[in-house]
Amino acid sequence: AAIDIPLLILPTRHQPWWAKLAKELARGLLPWRKPLRVAAVFRIELAWRIRPRARALAELLREGGYDLLYMNNQPASNLEGYLAAELTGVRVIQHCRIEPRINTVERDIINRIAHALICVSHGVRDALIRQGVRRELCHVVHNGIDTRQPFPELQPLAGVVSNTPVIGTIGSLIKRKSVAHLLHAVARLPQDLTPHLLIVGEGPEATALRQLADELGLTARVTFAGFQKQPLPWLAAMDVFVLSSPSEGLPRVILEAMLLEKPVVASNVTGSKEVVVHGETGYLYDYGDIDALAAHLADLLRNPAKRQAFGDAGRRRASADFSIEAYVAGVTKVLEAA
């Protein structure tokens, strides 16, 4: 249903020739001085892209008579919003959804202009504070999900024998998600354990992951489902959900898995470790420790009762601590106080 919110899109500013040349010179003249190289490229970006977009956005803010600018993702990708807010006197709130990395210029802009930063996890908040963002600006509001939604119909998997346990993951197939770790872990399982692996998502690593599955002798036991507009039926088809990435903000997909009573195995990193209770709703392992990941998978594959117990506990935790109502209340509180 339409919600009657006007949408305005700022056109992308084409990179002028001098900016391209200046950035290439910075990269070529400072190949071994990464801090200087990064700083030089950032200054060029600030001059040709960020500040002009800030002026254009400021015009929209003035024309619309807006009181508050709410921005998503991370500060480094929203600098024009900060600068536009400063030009117009509009209050600005940043919703940080991933563990950010900011430079000193970005830190100073945040501390000078932001009225509040909503952090999806304590880990995201701590990362900002470590990098110099004022503590009093940072407010933790965990992501939430609709805990009253009905269970989806299970997606049937072609060619998978009935009662075969299914291990799965959902997400963009990019290097940062480390889906290759999951393939290696499944390949290291004892020979008597032959689960099916379901990978839902698309991205630049898709071809390489298919090749890796072939090299590991797993092709017949892996389904690459591609991007799915409605992923929950595919999640419902899994017996164990895995998230093997090196960092997260607060992964909503884990909450969805828990709501669907799936035990979760996740790397012990920012975000994931605030959701998964080790030994109660699933298992946490040190990122990159493929043997540990394989051991946790083997344990769950051998113990259907444990899978069920972890799944039940996960649903209770998701429903009690990560409801959409709690999320809306938390965000509203920060917005009203700004």
Image: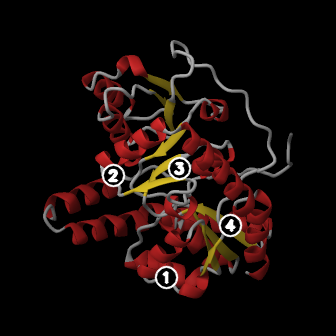
Residue 294 visible, this angle: yes
Question: Does residue 144 appear in this view?
Answer: no
The residue type indicated by label 1 comes to Val
* Image quadrant assignment for residue 27: bottom left
Residue occupying the point 73% across, 63% down: 327
Q: Which mark is residue 12?
A: 3
- Which residue in the structure is indicated by mark 2? 17
Which of the two labelled residues, at mark 4 and mark 1, occupies the earlier sequence position?
4
Local crowd size for mark 3, using a 10 Å CA cut-off: few (<14), some (14–19), many (≥20) = few
- Mark 4 vs mark 3, foreground winner is 4
Locate residue 40 relative to residue 90 in the image: left or right.
Answer: left
Identify the mark at residue 70; answer none if there is no mark: 4
* Image location (x, y in percent) of residue 288: 31, 51
Q: Answer above or below: position of 216 versus 135.
A: above
Q: Amino acid at mark 3?
A: Thr
Crowdedness near tag 1: few (<14), some (14–19) or many (≥20) residues, C-alpha within 10 Å: many
Determine whether label 2 and label 1 are within 8 Å by CB.
no
Point out the image quarter for the C terminus: bottom right
Quarter holding the N terminus is top right
Q: CA distance from mark 2 to mark 1?
A: 35 Å
Where does the image place residue 250, in percent across and percent down from the top left? Answer: 56, 59
- Disc 1 target residue: 133
Which label's residue is closer to the chain start, 4 or 3?
3
Q: Residue furthest top?
A: 159
